[in-house]
Amino acid sequence: MAYDRYLAISNPLRYNSIMNYAVCIQLVTISWLLGFLFSIINTIAIFRLDFCGPNVIDHFFCDLTPLLKLACSDISLVLIQNLITGVPVLILPLIFITVSYVYIVQAVLKISSRSGRRKAFSTCSSHLTVVSIFYGTLNASYMIPANGDSLNVNKLVSLLYTVVTPMVNPVIYSLRNNDIKEAIKMCFSFF
């Protein structure tokens, strides 16, 4: 999305020739394949662990931290591997999004009209809001130390990035639609 917004704002006349169907398919395919590859690498590492004791995970879903608490064998290799694979999965996309938005801001600031700048920024605001919510809660979830009472906080933050962010995503994007804005105004005018 960040690359798409960058092209739409920086190269509006060449947008259709650059962001064609083949490029979209390539971007989606690369995202899915890399996500699958890194998931398989971490899953294989977890399958090699020995588990003993209770088989109940104290979480909403099978998250890594509560799962590793059930392991009887040494989990240091899994933690190192997870850290190494987490860089390309989390950090590189965040860097790519940030760099794209730096270029977008530079391009928008070159627009001479105030209404043009406002329109360009409004096209990016939805995506930037969703990305901020997702990465903010995701980083908070994995930055909180995994001991004591923090497991309950971890559950709450995990709920935010797995349930709340996808639920809020369509709402944030639809608020740009004038028909939906009018419908919301009509709903609240009755109260």
Image (spheres, rainbow, N blue to C red):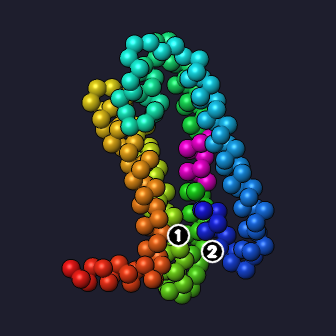
Q: Is label 2 in contact with label 1 (beta carbons under 8 Å)?
A: yes
Describe residue 101's horizontal placement relative to residue 20 as left or right. left
Q: In the drawing, what numbered circle is on residue 9?
A: 2
Q: In the drawing, what numbered circle is on residue 124?
A: 1
Indicate whether 119 appears above or below 31. below
Whichever of callouts 2 and 1 sits on the residue coming sooner in the sequence is: 2
Q: Residue at x 61, y 65 (%)?
A: 103
**What distance separates the C-alpha of mark 2 from that of mark 1?**
9 Å
Pick the quarter of the image with the N terminus: bottom right
Image coords of residue 39 (percent x, y) = 61, 35
Amino acid type of the residue tagged 1 in the rendering? Cys
Quadrant of the rendered structure where residue 99 is? Answer: bottom right
How busy is the neighbourhood of tag 2: few (under 14 within 10 Å), some, or many (20 plus)?
many
Amino acid type of the residue tagged 2 in the rendering? Ile
Along the line of sight, the residue nearer the viewer: 183 or 139: 183
Image coords of residue 145 (percent x, y) = 36, 31
In magenta segment, residue 115: no
Magenta stretch prevailing secondary structure: helix
